[in-house]
Amino acid sequence: MTPVTGPATTAGSTRSWSDRLSRRWIVTIGSIAFLAGPLIDALAGGPSILDFPHNGSGLVALVAPVIVDLESLSTRYARLRQSVGPRTLLRAVDARRLVCRRDWEDASRRLPSAPWDSYGAGALESWMDADRWLMSQPSTRPVSDGLLREIHCRAMRGHYFVGYERRRVRAALAGRRISRTLHDVILRHMVRGRRVYFSGVDHEQLVGVYRSDPLESFVHNGESFLPDGRRYLIPDELDRLRSNRFFRVDESSIVRIGPEKILGTVHYVAVHSVGENVRTVLENADRRLRRPSSPHRAVRTIVTLARDLLSIHPFIDGNGRTVRLLADHLLSCRGLPPCLYPNELDLLMTEDEAYHFTLRGMCAYVDEMEKAVTAGTTGTLGRTGSGGRGAAGRY
């Protein structure tokens, strides 16, 4: 879910992908009818949960419960890790952990040889460097504010914070410090991919820093779009946001324009409360993870932590990839694989839905890793158009 600082002017699009899950490790609970047809794509992490029929009575429960033998999955994962090296990353597999599932299909069409470049040149290299650094950290390191900031610093190194600059250009127009013509010219350059530093700020100063400027007061107006480009909420989306303790619905802004269309504003955590909320969430998770517990309970704790951090949205940009790296690290410390297909709509899922979605993604990661390892050992490594690495090669 992408935060905005005002009504959106461009419509988003849905992304889909096919997930192949190993029947050896997953037994789906529920009827065959429930899993049949287009809904299976959603259960596997397909289109946005907001793109399915809802008839005003509520969103379909999109993530069916699954049973996963985590001990067996961990053994299988350890065997694959041993075959490639404990700190080796497979570009074709691990790149999928960088790009949000909603962006991957479109990026694959536009940049077929390097879809990860949709997050900016060098994004994958910085992200994988951060992943390797995490592999070198002791499993006993506390889940702390310092760890989260360090991950962001490493994952976002060299990143251009386009939203940061765009908001300041718009603020300058609103304050009549620049003309409409200059405003339009600057934004046009940004759309074309030019790095315009209107603020005069070195963006290396923005990494590892929580939102603090009122200009970074993010709001959510919905995941759906009207013909004129305005966003709108659907009833269940609004209900789910109301049930998330980190969001505040501006009830005075709520206007129903149809049985399933609502105009309104939902506020993310206020900038002055970001640090406090992040530290509380991290401390609670660290305390729970240090207690003896089953692997499934640990996974639930990690999923809840990721969901809470995404809801808080502590950084100006790069929240999804930073939170994913932290969650994947915590899973790895327990001998468990990461979730293959990242999902930034966790905050619109219930905790149970997010948990089962993650279990599916963990199994999918091991399946894809196995395929990549097999391709590598049979000498079928191809070359990509970015960096000359193998399409299924070790990175």
Image (spheres, rainbow, N blue to C red):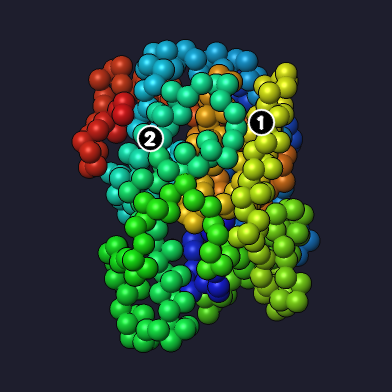
Q: Position of residue 214 (x, y in %)?
A: 56, 67
Residue occupying image coordinates x 66% and y 52%: 348
Q: Position of residue 366 (x, y in %)?
A: 49, 25
Residue 28 lies left or right of residue 116; in this view the side is right
Where does label 1 land, which residue?
A: 286
Residue occupying image coordinates x 47% and y 47%: 208
* Residue 236 seen anywhere in this rendered image of the structure: no
Name the secondary structure under disc 1. helix
Name the secondary structure under disc 2. helix
The C terminus, quarter of image: top left
Residue occupying image coordinates x 43% and y 39%: 96
Q: CA–CA distance between discs 1 and 2?
A: 24 Å
Tell me the tag on residue 258. Answer: none
Nearer the viewer's eye, disc 1 or disc 2? Answer: 1
Residue 340 lies left or right of residue 119; in this view the side is right
Where does label 2 land, which residue?
A: 128
Task: Give, as a three-letter code, the residue at label 1.
Answer: Asp
Up-down relation of residue 83 to residue 180 (above or below): above
Residue occupying image coordinates x 51% and y 49%: 319
Q: Position of residue 198 (x, y in %)?
A: 34, 70
Do the residues bearing badges 1 and 2 touch, measured as CB atoms within 8 Å? Answer: no
